[in-house]
Amino acid sequence: MNRWSIADLSPQALRLLALLAVMVLVILFFGTQIDRYYSTRMFNRVSTSVAIMALIATGQALVVLTRNIDLSVGSIVGFTAYAVGGVVTRFPDLNPAFAIGAAVLTGAAFGAFNGFFVAYARIPAIIVTLGTLALFRTFLVEYSGAKSIITADLPEWILSLPRTNLFSIGNLDIRLTFAVAVIVVVVVHLAVTRLRIGRKFYAVGSNPEAAVVAGIDSRRIVFLAFIACGALSGLAGFMFLSRFGNITVVAGLGFELKSVAAVVVGGVNIFGGSGTVIGAMLGAILVGLLDASLVRLQYMSEFWREAILGFLILAAVAIDSVFMRRLFAWRYARREKLQARLSAEGKAKGE
């Protein structure tokens, strides 16, 4: 009988286990460096920020699965937060569902703009979204007229959202925004893994040519991936507005790097075709945990925090590439050895 080992797990399961181990080590390390690190206040701060990044990382994961990337997510978050903030400032009694719908539709429109040029004009995603990163940010600057949305002008219902508790586990409060983010991630995960159209994202990312031969409209799938990414970034923009209140023209700046870091660290292959949305959310939790923890280290500058995120991306891609090659080589050698042994046993019985 063959003994089971951890190496028998799927590559994705191994990635998630490694990520969870890193998260535990990070929590233990900062617990020794920061006073009152294991507090409900710290948990609430991390979970609220993770709610925003998890949505962006989920959308980014869908795009990366199709062998593309979206560098405009931060600008979409910023524009959506400002636009919706301006609307609710002028109409404070506006139905919250309408405000959320407007944010999602605005983000989806930006995503469709990106998706059209990537999917149908055949322009590389990194070129398109690098351009729209600046273009959408310029839209925000022109739309805002160099003015800011301030907390005092926003209605109370939108400011109270980040503080709304859905339920509590002991002393830990599960905020509404975090619960919504988890629900969205789970729904997207089930859609991608269970529905036929969801599995096409993996097919297009794994082998675009084979996907076309199999009858999959790869351009439509890529287009839908960018729309979904924009819509989720729009929803994240609404949450960004409710959390911070004060929205300027630099809102969402830097979310591009954080979302890519969350996706790659979460085990989504940057070359497309493999990974999970759940992994992307775990990556967002790690990024949010590091961000909230490093801020409280007085000897750590903001520039070094960005450098650490960049290092995470490089390390995740490099380790994943080397580890996967070693794992596949080991499994192939073990399979060959097992087949040779079974063949030898068969010959011995025949004799």
Image: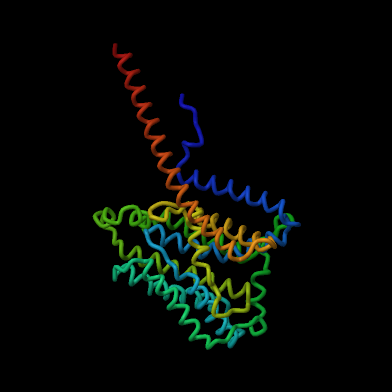
Residue 130 location, x and y as percent? 41, 71
Residue 25 location, x and y as percent? 63, 48
Figure quadrant of residue 169? bottom right
Task: Depth check: give the residue in front, 154 or 196.
Answer: 154
Residue 176 location, x and y as percent? 63, 65
Please tell me whether residue 157 is drawn above or below residue 124 in the rendered image: below
Residue 297 location, x and y as percent? 68, 60
Task: Depth check: give the residue in front, 131 or 198.
Answer: 131
At horizontal 63% and vertical 64% (from top left) the residue drawn is: 301
Q: Along the horizontal axis of the image, is 162 left or right of 254?
A: right
Which residue is the extreme one toward the top?
351
Task: Depth check: give the residue in front, 131 or 280.
Answer: 131
At horizontal 42% and vertical 53% (from top left) the residue drawn is: 269
Please tell me whether residue 197 is drawn above or below residue 87 in the rendered image: above
Please tell me whether residue 5 is drawn above or below residue 300 in the rendered image: above
Q: Along the horizontal axis of the image, is 59 left or right of 113?
A: right
Q: Along the horizontal axis of the image, is 144 left or right of 346?
A: right
Figure quadrant of residue 54? bottom right
